[in-house]
Image (cartoon, rainbow, N blue to C red):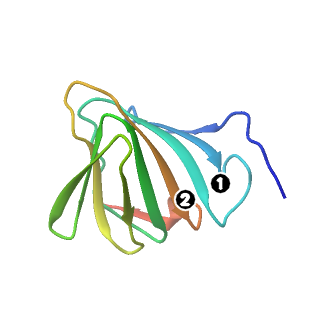
């Protein structure tokens, strides 16, 4: 099988972050994984969450901060990070001035009902 995606579908958000899903439940109706191109505005920060999927993030531009298990790491362009399912994690843009761009691969696919957000 081969499948090309010419453009993604924007997952609606109210916090300024853009989620452009190329593969997944929203764009291709697939549930085994999702792949999304993410754009986080300066100073963006999500509430803590616990997901029922593994997530790999791959930095493209800027720096994504990932806080979990009592530690904080920063994922820069060309770097990647795995957050295992069931981990309480906080994602944020490490910069107060510049946009952060990254890709997110979730297995199984991202669905709002698979993520418990705090607050």
- Quarter of the image where one finds residue 115: bottom left
Residue 66's place in the image compared with 116, above or below, is above
**Front residue of 23 and 60:** 60
Residue 22 screen position, x and y as percent: 64, 44
Quadrant of the frame with the C terminus: bottom left
Query: Does any portion of residue 119 appear in the rendered image?
Result: no
Position of residue 14 relative to residue 26, above or below, is above
Residue 88 x, y percent position in the rendering: 29, 68
Q: Is residue 5 left or right of residue 42?
A: right
Residue occupied by mark 2:
110
Q: Residue at x 18, y 57 (%)?
A: 72
Question: Mark 1 and mark 2 in contact (Cβ < 8 Å)?
Answer: yes
Q: Position of residue 6 (x, y in %)?
A: 73, 34
Q: Give whichever of 29, 69 is nearer the camera.
A: 69
Identify the residue under disc 1: 24
Task: Point out residue 93 in the picture as x, y percentages from the top left corner.
Answer: 27, 39
Residue 36 horizontal side relative to residue 31, left or right: left
């Amino acid at each position: 099988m081969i499948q090309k995606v010419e453009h993604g579908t924007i997952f609606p958000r109210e916090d300024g972050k853009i989620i452009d899903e190329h593969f997944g439940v929203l764009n291709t109706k697939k549930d085994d994984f999702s792949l999304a191109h993410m754009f986080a505005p300066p100073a963006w920060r999500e509430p803590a969450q616990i997901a029922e999927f593994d997530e790999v993030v791959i930095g493209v531009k800027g720096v994504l901060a990932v806080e979990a298990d009592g530690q904080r790491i920063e994922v820069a362009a060309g770097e990647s990070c795995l957050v295992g399912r069931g981990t309480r994690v906080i994602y944020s843009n490490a910069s107060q001035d510049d946009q952060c761009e990254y890709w997110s691969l979730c297995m199984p696919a991202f669905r709002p009902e698979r993520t418990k957000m705090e607050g």
